[in-house]
Image (cartoon, rainbow, N blue to C red):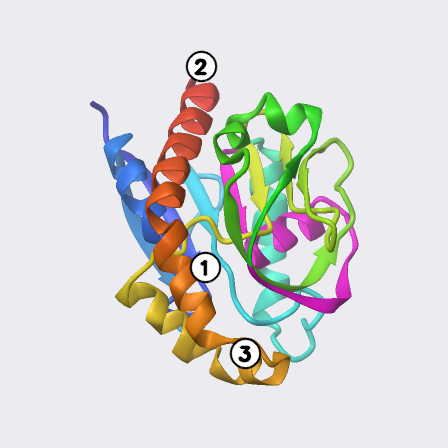
Amino acid sequence: MKTRKAIAIRHVHFEDLGTFAAPLRAAGFEIEYRDVGNDDYLAFDPVEPDLLVVLGGPIGVYEDEAYPFLADEIEALRMRLSADRPTLGICLGAQLIARALGARVYSSGIKEIGFAPLTLSAPGAASPLRHLEGLPVLHWHGDTYELPAGAELLASTPETVQQAFARADTVLGLQFHLEAEAGLPFERWLVGHACELAAAGLNVARLRADAERFGPSLKAAGAALIGEWLERMDG
């Protein structure tokens, strides 16, 4: 199998590829993380990697005055998307893709945090997201976005219409965190977002228990989703 290169832009260290790492490696990808805070984290040709993954983080796309690096990420994404290169965005990453495609990203006014199932659109049910049918996935966001021009809505929840979108077979945006891994990795999420959880009055023990309960099914579904998405992209 030919080795391919995947670059993952990571905004906070514990929000990594998680359960997505194994299926990517199984598909022949060598993974390289580029971490925000390193001077050279965007020092690569954004069109060159075989896959670019933009991961989540607890900031808003519209906070570019406070976090100027966001403008550089958006510009890199514009270049990559203009070349129609394979790109996956998760939560903040999906929002950055939406913004790079010209869509508005804004605060939804609510915190959607916890495990809940998706409602798949007709295109979503025919997409790799079909593997998530009936499964509660992890939501952890307070922002949303308009559907980018040329993209299809794949999934929604009652609280948030825009939960996933695709543009052809090469661009996939997931608002939710299918990559989050139960057990000790999830404990880092709970500690890293402790202030947000406390402010929202959420039950940490319940989140932990739900992660353990749904984790094995979500890990298998995530691997199937990523595997099918890559196959369609290659096909």
Q: What is the three-letter code of the residue carrying label 3?
A: Leu
Q: Quadrant of the N terminus?
A: top left
Q: Label 2 to label 3, Cα distance in Å?
A: 42 Å
Residue 91 magenta-highlighted? yes
> Is residue 43 among what the camera can see?
no
Q: Secondary structure at mark 2?
A: loop
- Residue 225: which quarter of the image? top left
Give whichever of discs 2 and 3 has the lower sequence position.
Answer: 3
- Residue 110 picture location, percent across and down: 73, 68
Provide the residue designation for mark 2. 235
Q: Which mark is residue 197?
A: 3
Q: What is the three-letter code of the residue carrying label 2?
A: Gly
Q: Quadrant of the C terminus?
A: top left
Provide the residue designation for mark 1. 42
Q: Secondary structure at mark 3?
A: helix
Residue 63 magenta-highlighted? no
Please tell me which residue is depicted at 60% across the width and 81% down the height of the picture: 201
User: Dot 3, crowdedness within 10 Å: few (<14), some or many (≥20)?
Assistant: some
Residues at marks 2 and 1 touching, judged by CB atoms closer than 8 Å: no
Front of the two marks 3 and 1: 3
Please tell me which residue is depicted at 40% across the width and 56% down the height of the picture: 180
Q: What is the three-letter code of the residue carrying label 1?
A: Leu
